[in-house]
Amino acid sequence: MHLNTKEAVAKRICELCAQADITINTLAMEAGIPPSTVYSMLNEKSQNPGVVSIKRICDGLNISLRAFFDSPLFDDLEQDIY
């Protein structure tokens, strides 16, 4: 099953929180963004999670953008333009 980019980003955020053993709320606090912003990235509300928000999440997790996207989740994404 191929994911779209938004689904892959949401799944990756959940994976990284699990690896760091932190909750979404803790991540939001560490990243300096409202929990609602993170939750909207995880559900259908946000169709296009911004790179600035993803960068803040990376900062909250103390990882680089490269590390964020270094996952098999991003290898075979669906084409987002039809």
Image: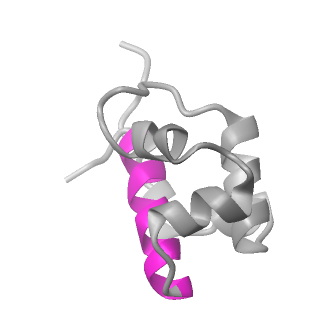
Location of residue 5 (image quadrant): top left
Which residue is more in the foreground, 59 or 66?
A: 59
Magenta region includes residue 30: no
Residue drawn at (67%, 45%) of the image:
33
Q: Residue at x 71, y 65 (%)?
A: 30
- Picture mark count: 0
Colouring rule applied to residues: one colour
Q: Quadrant of the C terminus?
A: top left
Q: Nearer the viewer, residue 74 or 53?
A: 53
Q: Is residue 18 above or below residue 5?
A: below
Residue that extends furthest to the top in the rendered view of this protein? 82
Give the prevailing secondary structure in the magenta stretch: helix
Observer-nearest residue: 7 or 59?
Answer: 59
Tell me residue 71's x, y (percent).
54, 69
User: Is residue 71 left or right of 29 when viewed as pictured?
Assistant: left
Against 53, residue 14 (above or below) is: below
Q: Could you tell whether 48 is left or right of 51 in the image?
A: left
The x and y percentages for residue 70 are 63, 68
Residue 81 in view (yes/no): yes
Residue 5 in sight from this viewpoint: no
The residue at 50%/74% (across/down) is: 17
How far from the left and from the top, in percent, is residue 76? Answer: 41, 52
Q: Position of residue 21 (x, y in %)?
A: 49, 87
The magenta segment? 6-20
Q: Is residue 39 above or below residue 73?
A: above
